């Protein structure tokens, strides 16, 4: 057997093992972020942000050896899982945990980001234009990852002080998947509707903060203009 062929096969074998291990890690972190993020909340979000970037970097280093085929049986060297699972978890956490007064600006930024990401993929690998399956994988990744990153950046990196309005928690609600043995992914508290934009008393709450909030607690509804112009609000402890 030609030495170059042998080296190539050995390299592919290592890549298969690395991708299989990466898939297991991505599934674990994605599942934790979606269902059990009452602990290590920000760490799980950071990993969901980084893992797809690491997968893209690996594809760049291997110079086209890998692909983004969604059906893994057809391609053991596919990075589809590493791209989509963390991205979907990040996007779902943004949907479940953040509150915006309007989604128009947020969606506009997301559309621009999707177009930029897909364009970059096509720029470095023009063959993707003729592969609907891989292009779909990349588009789904771009949608979920972009929305999650943009939504969290708008809130977490908001440089403006905003304003706080004091209120009292009237009720709490947890949506449970899989009946009583399932895991919660939607957590809300109800406050005085007069202090909430849009007069909706129910506000989404991060899973790592939900347990610390009880009925009757005095809290503040904080409102901010957003880093990217998408006004947002949340429930937090009032500053003394």
Image (spheres, rainbow, N blue to C red):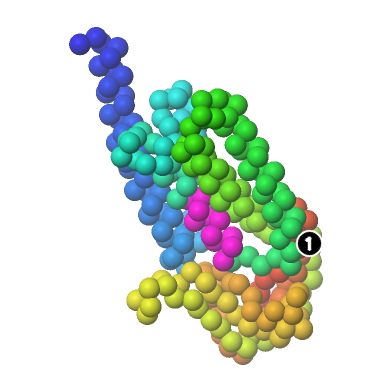
Percent across and percent down for residue 183 are 41, 71
Q: Residue furthest top?
A: 2
Q: Tell me the quadrant of the picture where the N terminus can be found.
A: top left
Q: Is residue 140 left or right of residue 32?
A: right
Number of numbered labels in the structure image? 1
Q: Tell me the quadrant of the picture where the C terminus can be found.
A: bottom right
* Label 1 SS: loop
Percent across and percent down for residue 96 are 57, 66
Above or below — where is 91 with respect to 181?
above
The residue located at (72%, 83%) in the rendering is 193
Percent across and percent down for residue 38 are 47, 68
| In the image, residue 125 lies in the stretch drawn in magenta | no
The residue located at (49%, 36%) in the rendering is 132
Above or below — where is 74 with respect to 125?
below
Q: Quadrant of residue 160?
A: bottom right
Q: Residue furthest left?
A: 1
Secondary structure, magenta segment, majority class: helix
Percent across and percent down for residue 128 are 51, 30
Q: Is residue 26 visible?
A: yes
- Circle 1 residue: 225
For label 1, count other residues whose C-alpha is less than 10 Å away and answer few (under 14), some (14-19) or many (20+): many
Q: Is residue 167 visible?
A: no
Q: Is residue 108 left or right of residue 208?
A: right
Residue sitting nearer the eye, 11 or 77: 77
Above or below — where is 21 with respect to 28?
above
Q: Is residue 137 left or right of residue 78?
A: right
The residue located at (60%, 26%) in the rendering is 123
Boundaries of the magenta span: 86-96
Above or below — where is 76 with respect to 109?
above
Q: Quadrant of residue 114?
A: top right
Q: Is residue 189 left or right of residue 133?
A: right
């Amino acid at each position: 057997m030609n030495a170059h062929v042998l080296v190539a096969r050995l390299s592919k074998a290592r890549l298969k093992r690395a991708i299989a291990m990466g898939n297991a890690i991505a599934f674990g972190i994605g599942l934790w972020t979606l269902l059990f993020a009452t602990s290590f909340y920000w760490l799980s979000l950071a990993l969901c942000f980084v893992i797809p970037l690491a997968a893209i970097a690996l594809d760049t280093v291997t110079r086209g050896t890998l692909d983004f085929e969604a059906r893994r049986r057809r391609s053991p060297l596919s990075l589809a899982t590493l791209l989509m699972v963390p991205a979907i978890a990040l996007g779902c956490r943004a949907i479940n945990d953040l509150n915006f007064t309007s989604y128009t600006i947020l969606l506009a930024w997301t559309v621009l980001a999707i177009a930029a990401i897909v364009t970059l993929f096509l720029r470095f690998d023009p063959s993707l234009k003729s592969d609907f399956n891989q292009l779909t994988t990349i588009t789904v990744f771009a949608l979920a990852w972009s929305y999650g990153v943009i939504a969290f950046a708008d809130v977490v990196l908001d440089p403006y002080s905003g304003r706080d309005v004091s209120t009292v928690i009237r009720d709490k609600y947890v949506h449970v998947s899989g009946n009583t043995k399932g895991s919660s992914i939607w957590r809300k508290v109800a406050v005085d509707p007069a202090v909430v934009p849009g007069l909706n008393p129910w506000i989404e709450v991060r899973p790592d903060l939900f347990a610390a909030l009880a009925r009757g607690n005095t809290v503040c509804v904080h409102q901010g203009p957003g880093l990217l112009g998408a006004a947002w609000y949340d429930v937090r402890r009032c500053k003394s």
